[in-house]
Amino acid sequence: AARKERVAEARREYEEGGMRGEFEEEAPVAERLDVPTFAFEAHDEQVRALALSKFSAPPKQLLEPPPPPHEQRQYLLSGSNDQTARLWILKRVLPPLATDKGGSISAEPVATLTGHSDYVNSVTFSDDGRFCATGSNDQTMKMWDIQDMVQLREYNKFQGHVAPVTAIAFSPDNRFLVSGSGVRNAAELGIEAAAVENSLRVWGTDTMEQQGDSFGGPDSGHQEAVTGVEMAMDASGGWQLVSEDVSGKLTVWDMQRRIELASVLADGQFQPADSTSDSVESLARKKKGQLGYTSEKVAGSAGSNFVVEAVEDMVMVFRRGNDKVAACFYAPDVVNCVAFNGTRIAAGCESGHVLLLSAPTLFEAGAEQQPDT
């Protein structure tokens, strides 16, 4: 409620002061920043999912000639109601002089990924930028090899879910693809959420086979649709699976044994399992504060003290643990989803447009400050 009131107040401030797309005077960064933005039509229908690559890994045909030093490239992947996903190269041209502000950012189309028979509502990149994956309401996933853009192809097709695929993620070594399912708006459709397969599945990317049984469903974890998954390392150096659902419940799993290690509810209440270790508890609490999985309109980034949230046609940037608006931007239309990788923001709209924002100075400065508790 407090955040919604602050959003309404921010809207009035920005509209009355003509401050669209600029930072507040009292933002964490003292000076105003000239933030490059770019809006473009990505799809003919609604954009339902977005992902930003973590770093640049140019495809083969882009290596010669190499981009000039003042250009930085990254990827954007968008999923839509038009049953396609589209891959874009982001280009930010920096000012010639380091003392100059601004520059520009743009998105150039690379390929359209086809083959799904229903909405594409989950997309992701592998950590190394070599692969991307798409999940759909048609209950399937596709994995794509994007290293060779000349012959972009479907790498594998996964089947097994009996509900829409709502979340997907690669393991850090690309050996596995983790998926979650469910119906995000089950309540609006009059569907009992617990009656839907709100499960997690692990797939081998080489074998195309499911690894073990599905888990995390109504009887063993998630009562509502899974909205986010991630492989994360705990303090002891072990890899665990983290998932979150529509209710805001975040769960840490032992991926090998398919058992719940701990969970954190939407209100922050920690629920340990019998064998929960200190490292697992630390991971659960940390990820609950980092990830914006509960809604596709909220996005966080590991290592960043900022959270991005969309409210109607506004994209708001907040400090973690603080309802104060650090920045506000207007999108071309009502925003369905947002993505944030620590330095760039992407917002997907009902109209099929995407708004891109590049503000590394803000986020780098904010990262030096400790998040509010």
Image (cartoon, helix red, strand yellow):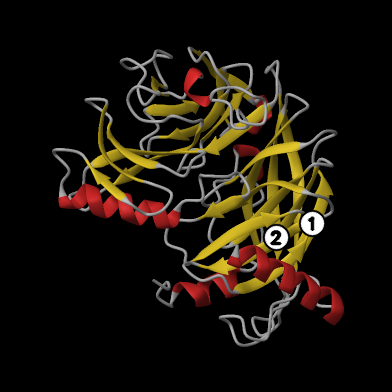
- Precedes in sequence: disc 1 or disc 2: 2
Left or right relative to 158: residue 297: right
- Rendered residue at 71%/79% (across/down): 101
Q: Is residue 119 visible in this depiction of the protein?
A: yes
What's the residue type where badge 2 is placed? Answer: Val
**Residue nearest the observer in this picture, 203 or 152:** 203
Quarter of the rendering containing residue 80 = top right
- Residue at which label 1 appears: 331
**Displayed quadrant of residue 318:** bottom right
Front-most of 272 and 320? 272
Q: Is residue 351 left or right of residue 206?
A: right
Q: Please determine whether, in this image, residue 68 is positioned above or below residue 45.
A: below
Residue 182: x and y in percent read: 53, 25
Q: Residue at x 79, y 49 (%)?
A: 334
Left or right of residue 17, residue 213 in this image: left
Q: Residue 158 bears which disc, if any?
A: none
**Residue 68 in picture, x, y percent from top left:** 66, 62
Quarter of the view holding residue 28: bottom right
Q: Position of residue 197 (x, y in %)?
A: 48, 19
Residue 43, image x, y percentages: 81, 36
Name the residue located 46 percent from the left edge and 68 percent from the top edge. 321
Residue position for label 2? 315
Question: Do the residues under discs 1 and 2 have CB atoms within 8 angstroms?
Answer: yes
Q: Amino acid at mark 1?
A: Ala
Quarter of the picture containing the N terminus is bottom right
